[in-house]
Amino acid sequence: MTLDGSTAPICLFLRGGLGNQLLQFAYIHYLANASKRRYSLYYSQPLFDSIWSILRFNTVRKIVPLVGLAANFSKYDPTLQSVLRILPSISCLRLLTESGTVSEHIAVLDSQRTIPIFLGYFHRTECFSPSTHSFWLTIYEVFRATYPMTPCKTNNTAMHIRLGDYLNKKNSKIYSAVSINDQVCRCLSYRPRHIAAKKVDIFTDEPEFVAKQLESQYHPYINIRSPKDPIEDLITLASYRLIWASNSTYSLCAGRISSLIHNTQTLVLPPRWFVADPMNNIEMKKWQDLDFVSKLDPL
């Protein structure tokens, strides 16, 4: 692979689930728009095979539709760590992590002698900036073409309840987990008057668990949707005009797409993101400033 002065490669190691991976793509899109050069994006899927492809400079370019983004690559971490120890010895490669600043990343992209390799979750407001609007709209159209379906047309409120890895004891100590009953109570109390008579549609990866946790008094006012494919659920969630979010990037992605479709603020943030105050305050302040966020959980 050679740099011809017009286009240059960007290598991306995908991390986490669908929401995290979409943010990584959006961040690269933002950087490419801010940089002075044009790029070809090469991304890892599966990670183990692509590591060696990247190191040998013969990566096969991946083209949307981005099917199967919800894969979890954590099991390859030991291999990845071994590879990262090799990278510094290859002079034309530059590893960029989430600890770096935006200006540092753009400077590396503008360099004509470096192949940037991005590794990290990149939870940044730049992922949702105006320069990424075309990315999110393209993703929406590509996903709709991949999963032909009629968008949900309803005045109901949508609610995303994140569980899955929350049930892991390690994660439960890091992320703030508001009780399911409390989340539903807040959502029902907040709904605007014109949709107060409508039900709340709950999106979750653990519907049976949610149903068991909910007090019987809430059941007449909710619909718990059976989970389908993560991409199909994202498309459906994004069709709602009001989304009550959990502390999940999946919620943020749905809110961003919904706001562009409906041209309005669509997302209500959860009361907390992390358990620890310093980390939580930084994260919440960051997301509160997004232009598609209606407000923080007001109750």
Image: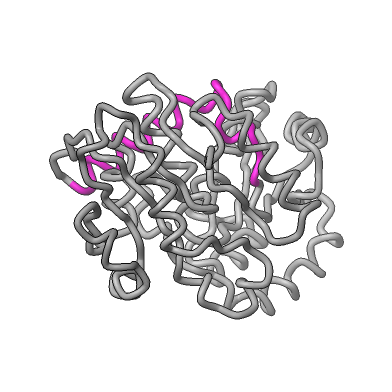
* Part of the protein shown in magenta: 123-147
Whether residue 219 is visible, yes or no, is yes
Q: Which residue is rendered at x = 33% and y = 68% of the image?
A: 215
Query: Image quadrant of residue 178?
Result: bottom right
Q: Which residue is rendered at x = 18% and y = 38% of the image?
A: 151
Whether residue 93 is visible, yes or no, is no
Q: Is residue 127 magenta?
A: yes
Q: Which residue is rendered at x = 41% and y = 31% of the image?
A: 266
Instruction: Give the vertical position of 111 relative to 221 (above or below).
Output: above
- Is 86 positioned to the left or the right of 10 in the image? right
Q: Which residue is rendered at x = 13% and y = 40% of the image?
A: 150
Locate residue 5, reporting x and y percent: 67, 27
Q: Is residue 267 magenta?
A: no
- Is 215 positioned to the left or the right of 131 in the image? left
Question: Which residue is nearer to you in this view: 202 or 128?
Answer: 202
Instruction: Count the marks.
Output: 0
Locate residue 24, reporting x and y percent: 57, 46
Q: How is the image coloured?
A: one colour
Locate residue 23, reporting x and y percent: 55, 44
Instruction: Give the vertical position of 293 relative to 162 (above or below).
Output: above
Locate residue 229, reporting x and y percent: 28, 60
- Which residue ends up furthest to the front in the rendered image? 217
Question: Which residue is nearer to you in this view: 74 or 187?
Answer: 187
Instruction: Give the vertical position of 241 relative to 79 (above or below).
Output: above
Question: Which residue is nearer to you in this view: 90 or 44?
Answer: 44
Query: Image quadrant of residue 148?
Result: top left
Q: Main secondary structure of the magenta part?
A: helix
